[in-house]
């Protein structure tokens, strides 16, 4: 564009009587013809502002206007991500203060409104336009950390949507096709919109990095001028940020919420759902705050939210894993999967510092012992004996688990089982159900030994009988042993009594393949569901007081 064309453009614009004309076109050298005419127009019309580029390697303004108030720099601050978020009002070289292109234009327009720049009463180094103070950008405001805050920078809000500023072609201006009212008392900016000029920028409202989402440099300066006019005339507030303490509290709040969430969710698959939900909430909160004029940091709280939630979730998950290993190590081989899962679901009332807590329970204890095992072990070699005994133990253990019992211990050919552990029974009905389960288990063991004897006879292996003692009463249940090796067991007089019932008078009822003796405390819970007979009131070995014992020899069903 020659100086003659540019002079004609400005002369035509002046006919429309705008308040200010911004020439966003570098003119550091003349482009004849028409240079004298252009210089004359620039000198005679002080409402025309031309641009310069700041710094030693910058671009000078037209020589005729150098060091006048008709010059403003059009430097733009582009963040490392390629987006413009900040504008400039002033720059200095250590000796002189320079005004920005947009500020020069805004001040010319505001002069007609009687508004001039003033220092803020409480902060004299802050610029005040009308009723609005524009605080300078600090290096860690908003989402920034140690940013370059030199010069007088301020946040751009881009509240003027795309298409807010009418644009006209040079052709339509020179042919005077534009209505007078369209430009009268307005701020008019002249600049290039051709792609070849490479004067394009991305803003926070750019939805992608496609060329279609860029704005021209002249449009960017129009946004800045418009924002300054809104602050001064409408009293709109500039973009606000949290103070450092408030930011620290905001970030800490999300760290605490992340930690609390990690404690509550406790599993990794729920973490992904809740973590994503938290990020969505944080994103939309920051997004809505931005449109209300607040720039609240997004990345730091999002990072601490994810890190704290993930860390606590991993810690809780690992803790639960160790607790589950402890519980399953104690019970998984001795109870049914359903009972083991029930123990895990109710672990809070069962575990104390990762170790099963001792507690007093009402339990039905069952002891069983093979009759004739001593003679069998004398006649068999070690390996066949172990195989034979394991067959017996596998069958009996499965029966105990099937009837809701927990295998407590093996001692040679003996088995100790508890019905009613490890979760407390809270009613007489539950205690009675454990006693009935123990009795049913004993009868099932009788049927199983009958089957095994038939199998063993075919294999020319010895057959045996069983003695079983069952007693119901209070016990102390807990984990015994060291941290390297724990064993969940029951202790107390009830356990001793059940053991004595099993070993009582080994010649009594010898004709029975499976002799089942129970105490009176157990019989009270059995009701009339089993065939029983009174054995008598006896003093068991190692006991001082007599107890009444009964024999079960069948179920009434």
Image (cartoon, helix red, strand yellow):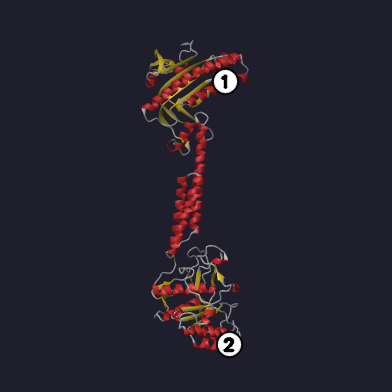
Residue drawn at point x = 52 percent, y = 17 percent = 449
Residue highlighted by disc 2? 35
Quadrant location, the N terminus: bottom right
Quadrant location, the C terminus: top left
Q: Which label's residue is closer to the chain start, 2 or 1?
A: 2
Q: Position of residue 148 (x, y in %)?
A: 53, 69
Q: Position of residue 331 (x, y in %)?
A: 50, 31
Mark 2 against mark 1, which lies toward the viewer? Answer: 2
- The label shown at residue 176 is none
Residue highlighted by disc 1? 389
Q: Is residue 69 visible?
A: no
Q: Position of residue 89 (x, y in %)?
A: 49, 75
Kindly state the secondary structure of the residue where label 1 is placed: helix
Give whichever of 269, 438 is nearer the camera.
269
Q: Is residue 321 above or below residue 334?
A: below
Kindly state the secondary structure of the residue where label 2 is placed: helix
Q: Is residue 527 visible?
A: yes
Q: In this image, 388 relative to 296: left or right?
A: right
Contact (Cβ within 8 Å) of mark 2 with mark 1: no
Give whichever of 420, 84 is nearer the camera.
84
Q: Is residue 337 above or below residue 530?
A: below
């Amino acid at each position: 564009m020659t100086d003659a064309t540019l002079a004609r453009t400005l002369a035509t614009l002046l006919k429309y009587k705008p308040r200010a004309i911004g020439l966003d076109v570098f003119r550091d050298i003349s482009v004849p013809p028409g240079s004298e005419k252009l210089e004359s127009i620039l000198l005679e019309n002080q409402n025309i502002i031309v641009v310069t580029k700041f710094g030693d390697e910058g671009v000078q303004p037209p020589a005729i206007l150098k060091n006048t108030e008709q010059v403003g720099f059009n430097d733009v601050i582009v963040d490392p991500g390629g987006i413009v978020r900040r504008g400039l009002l002033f720059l200095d070289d250590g000796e002189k203060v320079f005004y920005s292109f947009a500020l020069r234009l805004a001040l010319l327009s505001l002069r007609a409104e009687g508004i001039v720049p003033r220092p803020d009463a409480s902060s004299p180094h802050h610029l005040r336009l009308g009723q609005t103070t524009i605080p300078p950008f600090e290096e860690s405001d908003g989402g920034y950390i140690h940013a370059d805050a030199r010069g007088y920078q301020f946040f751009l809000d881009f509240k003027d949507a795309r298409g807010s500023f009418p644009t006209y072609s040079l052709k339509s201006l020179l042919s005077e096709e534009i209505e007078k009212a369209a430009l009268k008392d307005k701020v008019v900016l002249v600049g290039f919109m051709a792609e070849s000029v490479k004067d394009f920028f991305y803003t926070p409202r750019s939805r992608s990095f496609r060329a279609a989402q860029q704005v021209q440099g002249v449009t960017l300066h129009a946004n800045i001028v418009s924002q300054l006019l809104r602050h001064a005339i409408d009293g709109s507030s500039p973009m606000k940020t949290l103070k450092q303490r408030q930011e620290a509290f905001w970030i800490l709040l999300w760290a605490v919420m992340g930690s609390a969430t990690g404690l509550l969710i406790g599993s990794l698959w729920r973490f992904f759902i809740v973590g994503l939900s938290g990020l969505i909430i944080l994103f939309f909160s920051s997004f809505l705050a931005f449109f209300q004029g607040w720039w609240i940091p997004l990345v730091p709280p999002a990072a601490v939210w994810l890190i704290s939630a993930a860390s606590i979730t991993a810690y809780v998950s690992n803790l639960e894993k160790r607790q589950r290993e402890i519980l399953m190590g104690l019970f998984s081989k001795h109870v049914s999967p359903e009972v083991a899962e029930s123990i895990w679901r109710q672990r809070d009332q069962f575990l104390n510092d990762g170790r099963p807590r001792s507690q007093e329970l009402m339990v039905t204890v069952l002891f069983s012992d093979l009759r004739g095992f001593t003679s069998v072990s004398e006649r068999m070699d070690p390996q066949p004996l172990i195989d034979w005994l394991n067959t017996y133990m596998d069958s009996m253990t499965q029966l105990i688990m099937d009837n809701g019992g927990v295998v407590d211990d093996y001692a040679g050919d003996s088995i100790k089982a508890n019905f009613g552990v490890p979760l407390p029974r809270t009613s007489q009905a539950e205690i009675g159900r454990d006693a009935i389960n123990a009795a049913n288990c004993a009868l099932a063991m009788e049927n199983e030994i009958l089957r095994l004897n038939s199998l063993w006879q075919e294999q020319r292996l010895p057959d045996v009988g069983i003695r079983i003692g069952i007693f119901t009463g209070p016990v102390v249940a807990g984990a015994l042993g060291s941290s390297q090796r724990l064993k969940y067991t029951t202790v107390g007089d009830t356990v001793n009594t059940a053991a004595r019932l099993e070993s009582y008078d080994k010649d009594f009822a010898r004709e029975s393949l499976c002799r089942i003796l129970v105490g009176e405390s157990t019989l009270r819970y059995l009701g009339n569901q089993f065939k029983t007979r009174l054995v008598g009131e006896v003093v068991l070995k190692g006991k001082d007081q007599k107890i009444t014992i009964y024999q079960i020899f069948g179920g009434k069903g």
